[in-house]
Amino acid sequence: MTDPGVQPTAERTPGPGPGPDPLLPLDIVTRFLDENGLGTGPVMAERIGDGQSNLTYALRRGDETVVLRRGPRPPLPRSTHDMVREAQVQRFVGERGVPVPRILAVCPDETLLGVPFYVMEHLDGLVITDDIPEQLSAPEERRRTSEQLVDLLATLHDVPVDNEDAAGLGRPDGYLERQVSRFSRLWPTVSERELPLVGELATRLSARIPVPQRASLIHGDYRLGNLMFERSSPARVRALLDWEMSTLGDPLADVGYLMAMYADADAPASIMQLTPVTREPGYLTRRELAERYAAASGADLGELGWYEALALWKAAVFCEAIHTRWRHGERPGDDFGPRLTEGVPELLRAAEAALDR
């Protein structure tokens, strides 16, 4: 999950950025690009994207632009910032028809930037967040945008993973159990508040973990804001972005996450609804999204409330970590941290309501 305190821009169209970045020494980057035949001449860099965990930069050399992804400054947990693995996943799905940026070069050598990194092609397109692009604003385009969102998820979950090429992408057995256990242990390390509902929900989630209907590659942060669309109508997905949370597991975890993060006019607003425009007329509702996914995948969504509850409960833990850092003065000028004083309990109550369904 990317940091919800930073909103994505409506369009990811980078340009040259001012000033050096200590996490991106351009002399080292230039030599790496030269060694891999990626452009010529001076390099200009600009930070892009909406995340503050893994870092993304647009690198421009003359008329050519590429994108570099690296992890944050060490020390860091390798499991969540493995750039070599992230590039491997993108190559894997790209070769199987999922639209993703093409990987151009991978650097596992930590001595260059302090962490592994990779370079991929730059794609020009539209990312929908706070505003609806004019090209996709007609009622039929809004509906098609929602349909594309669901259909791509079904396509991703249909990618075969029972082959040697998928080995090393994750361990599907016990995925849900590990999620509940991991976030239960994480809570006391990120929170300084007494919120008993966290433990109560962990107990309830653990007591009725669904039996997965199948295993698939899951994205882990599947939401509208991580899709890039073509700049012209009709609405067509150009790329699915931000694969840092991907693994093998229960595909309904992606579906529950999408439902939990999707803004719906018929459902209460949430601090985790990072693309609020889907509350506007024309976009599919959560119920319609679920029905379309079920029709495309053949999945039984009878336990969808459990998966939504899991997503909301995990989001509460993530957000509590942000709230604690804000309280310690580690996020100066942040207007998201104060909202989490009540926002985290609201997420927990929403998770409880989803579980009751």
Image (spheres, grey):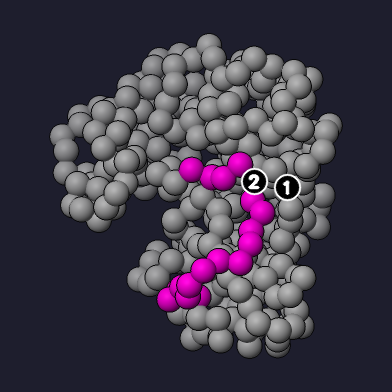
Rendering coords of residue 258 (x, y %): 57, 32
Q: Residues within 10 Å of mark 1 (few under 14, many from 20)?
A: some
Name which residue lies at 61% across and 42% down. 10
Name which residue lies at 49% across and 86% down. 111
Which amino acid lies under the numbered mark 1 shown in the image of this protein?
Gly
Dividing the picture into quadrants, the one containing residue 87 is bottom right
Left or right, 190 with reference to 228: left
* Local secondary structure at mark 1: loop
Rendering coords of residue 123 (x, y %): 74, 56
Name which residue lies at 74% across and 75% down. 62
Q: In this picture, is 36 found above or below 288?
A: below
| Between 94 and 327, the one nearer to me in the picture | 327
Name which residue lies at 76% across and 32% down. 135
Residue 197 can be seen, yes or no: yes
Tell whether position 13 is magenta.
Answer: yes
Quadrant of the rendering where the C terminus is positioned: top left
Of callouts 2 and 1, which one flags the residue occurring earlier in the amino acid sequence? 2
Give how far apart the Cα atoms at labels 2 and 1 are.
7 Å
**Magenta region:** 7-24
Marks 2/1 in contact by CB < 8 Å: the verdict is yes
Residue picked out by circle 1:
125
Tell whether position 226 is magenta.
Answer: no
Residue picked out by circle 2:
11
Q: Residue furthest top?
A: 266
| Between 236 and 352, the one nearer to me in the picture | 236
Q: In this picture, is 268 found above or below 244?
A: above
Query: Main SS type for the magenta part?
Result: loop
> How many labels, in total?
2
Dividing the picture into quadrants, the one containing residue 23 is bottom left
Left or right, 148 with reference to 188: right
